[in-house]
Every structure is written in structure tokens, then in C-alpha cells.
Amino acid sequence: MTKGYFAFVLHGHLPYVLSHGRWPHGTDWLSEAAAETYLPVIRILDELVSEGYSPKLTMGLSPVLCEQLADVSFKDEFTTYLQQKIEAAQHDSEEFYKLGQKGMLSNAQYWEEFYDQTLKRFKQIDRSIVPEFRRLQDSGVLEIITCGATHGYYPLLSRDESLQVQTKMAIKNYQRHFGRAPRGQWLPECAYRPRYEWTPPVPIEGQTGSYLRKGSEEFLTENGIDFFIIDSVLLKGGKSVGVYIDRFDALKLLWGQFEKQYHPREEEIDKTPHEIYLISSAPEGKKPTAIFTRDPETGLLVWSGEHGYPGDGNYLDFHKKRFPGGHRYWAVTSSKADLADKVEYNRNSALQRIPENASHYADKVEETLSNYYETSNQAGILVAPYDAELFGHWWFEGPEFLKQALINIEEKKSVEPTFLYEHLDRTQPSKIISIPEGSWGQGNHHYIWLNKDNEWTWKHIYESEKKMCELARYWVEHPDHQDSELKDMLKQLARELMLMSASDWQFLISTWAARDYAELRLSEHYEDFKHLAEMIEKKIDGQTLDAGEKQFFANCQKRDHLFEDIEIEWFARVEYPA
């Protein structure tokens, strides 16, 4: 008898890096994720089907990620990347052979085989990763949900038009890539804000006081999205455990500055992450949105690099690399070990740890759902959401763990794997609640994305949001000035704003993971936005653009060419104003 349902959820996202550098920050990020996460996830799902299993995996694919994976320039870049990794492994093999380092030689040969097989697989699928995800969804083993178009941080964007664009562009992009409308959306950073009189946390020039803002969920339900995912503390209260705190030392230091201001909300024992609720912060009459809640206990088993499975000493260490080539040859050894103390990686020893970890995980899922069934007399759901890149990129053996965990869950007689939309349709929830503002960061608030180190980014974003909406309104209100060049320029202006608004930049600044790159990228988009806006205003005034300006515009179009079907009107007015 089914005592509960289990949903494994991966969130796939990377910021726009095409034409913005290669290494150490740039397209190599995308290539690494494709080789180590996206293609392996596709592979293990195909393997499970061929072995007679019926896996069910939910995966969020951000629109900006889909645009990059589908871009011809990425396909060429990724092919070159794989060839370089193969050559680097061959070079390492020659050196290790001469030195008689048998363990290192074995690892180098593994890397050569890994990247060679990846390249062959990429060619077999006609270098098209997104259609493979579509195929898996169409065949019933994968549920794909969408995300804010460029991963904009919904609670901190200053205008409802921006939230509208992030949502509408996401849905339109999903329909183009997957041939249907999405049922669910991953709110970037699981960050939510209800409807209220909102005061910008950073001053906006020419604007004072607070103003009424719509709740994040309103944009979803208005556009046909049925559900999203939140952190458990937003539902129940209690002490927060952020998903990133174990992975970045800089966040621990940053959290120390905010911890004294943090006062956990009293836990509400009548709410549980194993039920679906409806939320609405809008006036009566608007359709509420369903929420699924992250299970905190099983989450830590995978998220935590210190206390979870990825911290096992046998697994491949993420940080220590050999140059040139960048291959990894060392094991985690221990979560506290310095890089100099890392021991040689042994692939067989690492794989031998997978069955125990996956079995423990499945047992924990079963135990949690059984306990809930015994106390409530109803079958609940356990939702396990993670960043997709954790599986393969951060934790190299993660895809093998994922495969074995899905097998173990499927073989549990009391647990039934499910897609989120399936469980929503199955249960038809009716209980409407309210939840507070927050995210899945430590403390469940915004400090990672808004602090003294990245406050300046919001000044740029707020200024640009205001200007974009002004120019879009002019376009709509003056049809006599609507020519193709002005339209193309406004669409490019919108792209620069949306790329500027990605939450990744504030995150990378706070974690110091790629601080210089993030600061440069946001600044470049801001400067390009300002220049384009000046050119647009010049054209509106009837002046002719000079050759240099036209070349600048062409350069922007060539470099940042995602979302061809973006609509200027989305920035001009909010469809359903607050």
C-alpha cells in the first residue's frame, strides 16, 4: 500500500555566458555543466528505462539555460571543449606513464574515456541537448518546469513589469522549446514576496515612499502556472538552514554579520511540508497557486558538503585540479582536509560508496513518509529539490547516486515516485494559507542577494528598470514612431536589462566564487543599457544614428542574442495592475 509519494526535483540553471569569456569564468562553466550534469542525467534516465524501470524525475530548466544550450555557438564551443579535455587527459597519461604513477595514470585514462564518450554521445544526438530533455518529457519519464527567464530575484526587482516579463518570457520560451505550456515554475532562489506596500531597499532616483506591489504568485497564476516550490521554513517557521552555507566560506562570514538580526519565526506545528497548500496574497477572486515544500531532513543528506554524502572521503574532490588541462585526480579525503593533504582518487572506491548512500537515502525517504502516514493517516509527499549542477559538477558521482536512488525508491512498496503536477492533480488541495517573504538562503531572507558588497548592483538595476518601462510606454503610445530599427533596439535594451537582473551576479559577489567576473558582467550590461537607451532617445528625437552607434548596436545584438521573441509591450504596462 502506498504510504507516501516522492518527487526528486533538479533545478538546472546557469547565467548567460556565451560571448562573455571562456576560462576561468565564462563558457567553460556551461561546458562543464553539460558534460558533467545535463548529459549524464539524460544518460541515466535512458539507462533506467532500458533496464526496465519507470523513473520519474522533475527538472527545472531555466529559459536562459535553454537558450544557451540551443545556440549554435555553444555547440561549437562544447565540441572544442571536449576535444581539449581529451587531449589534456592524453598528455597527462603520457606524463604519469613516464613517472610510473599507476593510480594517476588510471585516472587520466578514465578522463580520456569519459570525455571521448561524451563527445560521441553529443554527436549522436545531433549536438542538441534541449530536444533530448523534450524527448524524455514526451516519453513520460521527465517532468520539466520553467523558471524566471534570466533568474531575476523576484522579491527585490523594483517593478511589477519586471516580474511580468520574467514570467511571460519564461512561458513563451518553454512553449517554443518543449511544445507545450509549463505547469510549474521554479522561483529563482525559491524567493517569494507577498502583495504589500513595498519600499525599495535601495533608493530610486525621483521616487519616494512605498507603493503597492503584487505578490510573486500572482504573476504565475495569471499566466497559467499552477505551482512553485518553497523552503520549509517559509511554510512552518522555525530555525532556517540555508542550502548554500556549507559550500561557501564567504557566506558563513556574511551570515555572521546578519545572524544577530535573525529571529526565527515560531514554528507552526499544524503545517507540514508533506502536504500541498494553496497560497494567495491577492484580493478575493484571483485563483490561488499551489506550493510544494522542500523536505529539510533529506535535503541536508545531499546538499551538505560537510555532513552529507558528497563529503565522503572517497568521492572526487571538486576544488583540486591539475594544470594545464584542469582534470581532477584527488579525492575529498575529508571535509576538513587542505588541498595539499588530498589523496589520490580511486574511481572504484568511490563507486562502491554509491549503493550504501543511495540505500540510506531511500530508507530515510520511506521512514519520513511512513511516520507521516502513521500520524496523519494519509499519504503525504516528500519533495527533494536540489540544484541540478550538484549532481555531476559539484559532486561528480552524483548522477550515479541519482540513478541508484531512483531505483531504490521505485522498489519501495510503500513509496510511489511522482511528478509534481501528478500529485497536484491527484490531491486537488483546497486549504489556502499565507506565507512570509523569503528565500532558501540561510535565515530565509535576502541577505545573500542584498548586502553592503552588492547593494550598488540594485541601484543600476532600479535605474534601468525605470528607463526601460518609460521607453516601452513611449513605443506603445506612439505607433507612428514604430519602425523596425527602433523595435529591434528596444528589444535589445530589454535583453541587456534582463541579463543585468540575473540573481547570479549578487550571489557570486557574496560568495566570492567569481566576484570580479560578476561585477564586470553586471557593469557591462549596465553600460550597454545606458548607451542603447541614449541612442533610442536620440532616434525618438528624430536624429540619425552615426556609424559608430550602429556598429555598437550590432555588436550588442551579436553578443547577447537570446529571446528573439521578447515583447516590448510587457514592459509598457502591467496586465493586471495591483
Image (cartoon, rainbow, N blue to C red):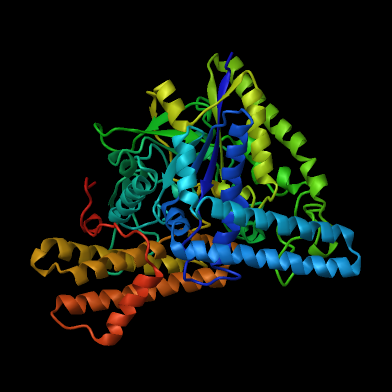
Closer to the camera in the image, 49 or 184: 49
**Residue visible at 64% across and 35% down?**
298
Do we see residue 203 in this rendering? no
Q: Nearer the viewer, residue 478 or 247?
A: 478
Q: Is residue 273 visible?
A: yes
Quadrant, the N terminus: top right
25 horizontally vs 557: left or right: right
Q: Relative to 278, does residue 216 appear above or below in the rendering? A: below
Which residue is outermost to the left?
480
Q: Relative to 488, is 294 on the left or the right?
A: right
- Number of marks: 0
Q: Position of residue 125 (x, y in %)?
A: 52, 50
Relative to 250, residue 191 above or below: above
Name the spot of residue 226 as percent of width and height, x first. 37, 35
Residue occupying image coordinates x 37% and y 23%: 430
Residue 162, quarter of picture: bottom left
> What x and y, as percent, mark residue 319?
71, 61
Instruction: Judge by depth and name the residue closer to the eye, 450 or 60.
Output: 60
Whether residue 370 sits left or right of residue 467 in the image: it is right
Residue 469 at x, y percent in the picture: 24, 62
Check the image and report above or below for 5 versus 14. Answer: above
Question: Is 389 on the left or on the right of 496, as rendered?
Answer: right
